[in-house]
């Protein structure tokens, strides 16, 4: 029995080693900004892949900070900046610490100009627009109104959030409680989707007239690993917690 279990473990590991041991000709990383956190297993895994040619496709190479683009440079293996210490010295230290910000920004712009190819709707190749057949963007706004009970629930949350923020402002503690304030705003956003996304409300128990798509949380299991979901954010009709 133990021998079969070890064989199963080896079979489960095989895809991981297959990817890492294969010498690829070309790797194209779509939505490359998803590896912006260099400490994640996904970022470390794709950077370990061996390939002759590497491409990153993304509309947002930097979403929040300069560090976001490091993982892309590490994946592309652009020396010397694919080394974290070199990247810190060249860009993060002068730009974020401010002792040589202009020079750091010029250096970053020079690097991006050398490695980045930007395509827009107006981009042309040999005088022909590459996206000539792309239709213009159209925006359609649909505003959903709260029902009476939803309106009452949301306004109660809103009043409580405003009261709490006013208290922080009166005490002069806005900066110290910024994480709490963002949490209050998140709860208001969740309330616009469904009140049961707010954990404090969900844990009180489900009423008899529970909304469609919400089930009891006991016995819920993850749809991916089949492990029990101890605190699912939402429960689908198939009883999988997400």
Image (cartoon, helix red, strand yellow):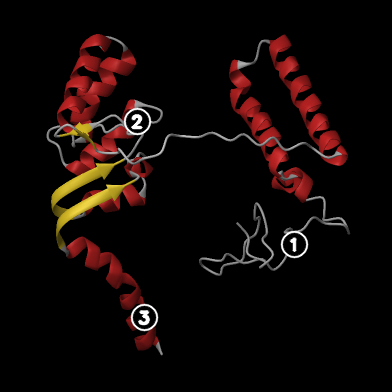
Q: Position of residue 180 (x, y in %)?
A: 64, 28
User: Of the residues tagged 3 and 1, which is closer to the observer?
Assistant: 1
Q: Is residue 215 left or right of residue 54?
A: right
For disc 3, the neighbor class at 10 Å (few under 14, some 14 to 19, many from 20) is few
Which type of secondary structure does the marked residue at label 2 adopt?
A: loop
Identify residue for label 1. 215
Q: Earlier in the sequence, mark 2 or mark 3?
A: 3
Q: Quadrant of the C terminus?
A: bottom right
The x, y position of residue 96, in whole percent, is 33, 17
Residue ID for mark 2: 62
Give the quarter of the image for residue 234.
Answer: bottom right
**Residue 116 seen anywhere in this rendered image of the structure:** no
| Structural distance between the alpha carbons of marks 3 and 1 | 35 Å
How many numbered callouts? 3
101 up-or-down from 134: above or below: above
Between marks 2 and 3 in the image, the one whose residue lies nearer the viewer: 2
- Structural distance between the alpha carbons of marks 2 and 3: 41 Å
In this rendering, position of residue 230 left or right of residue 35: right
Q: Is residue 2 left or right of residue 85?
A: right
Would you call the spot at circle 1 few (<14 residues within 10 Å), some (14-19), or many (20 or more)?
some
Q: Residues within 10 Å of mark 2 (few under 14, many from 20)?
A: some
Q: Nearer the viewer, residue 132 or 55?
A: 132
Relative to 27, residue 17 above or below: below
Give how far apart the Cα atoms at labels 2 and 1 are: 39 Å
Residue 239 is tagged as none
Residue shown at the point (74%, 15%) measured from the top left = 166
Query: Under tag 3, what secondary structure?
Result: helix
The image quarter containing residue 241 is bottom right
Return the x and y of residue 81 as percentages of the image width and height.
17, 32
Rendering quarter of residue 115: top left
Q: Which residue is mark 3?
A: 8
> Residue 50's spot in the image, x, y percent?
16, 55
């Amino acid at each position: 029995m133990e021998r079969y279990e070890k064989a199963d473990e080896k079979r489960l590991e095989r895809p991981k080693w297959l990817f890492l041991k294969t010498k690829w000709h070309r790797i194209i990383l779509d939505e490359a900004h998803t590896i912006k956190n260099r400490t994640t297993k996904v970022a470390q895994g794709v950077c370990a892949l061996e390939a002759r040619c590497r491409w990153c496709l993304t509309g947002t190479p930097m979403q929040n900070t300069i560090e976001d683009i490091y993982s892309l440079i590490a994946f592309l293996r652009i020396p010397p900046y694919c080394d974290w210490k070199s990247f810190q010295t060249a860009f993060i230290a002068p730009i974020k610490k401010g002792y040589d910000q202009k020079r750091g920004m010029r250096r970053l712009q020079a690097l991006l100009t050398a490695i980045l190819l930007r395509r827009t709707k107006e981009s042309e190749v040999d005088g022909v627009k590459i996206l000539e057949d792309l239709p213009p963007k159209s925006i359609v706004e649909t505003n959903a109104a709260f029902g009476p009970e939803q309106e009452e629930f949301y306004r109660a949350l809103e009043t409580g959030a405003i009261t709490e923020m006013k208290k922080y402002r009166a005490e002069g503690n806005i900066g110290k409680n910024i994480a709490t304030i963002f949490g209050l705003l998140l709860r208001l956003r969740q309330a616009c989707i469904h009140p049961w996304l707010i954990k404090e409300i969900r844990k009180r128990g489900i009423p008899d007239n529970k909304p469609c798509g919400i089930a009891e949380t006991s016995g819920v299991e993850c749809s991916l690993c089949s492990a029990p979901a101890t605190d699912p954010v939402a429960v689908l009709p198939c009883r999988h917690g997400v």
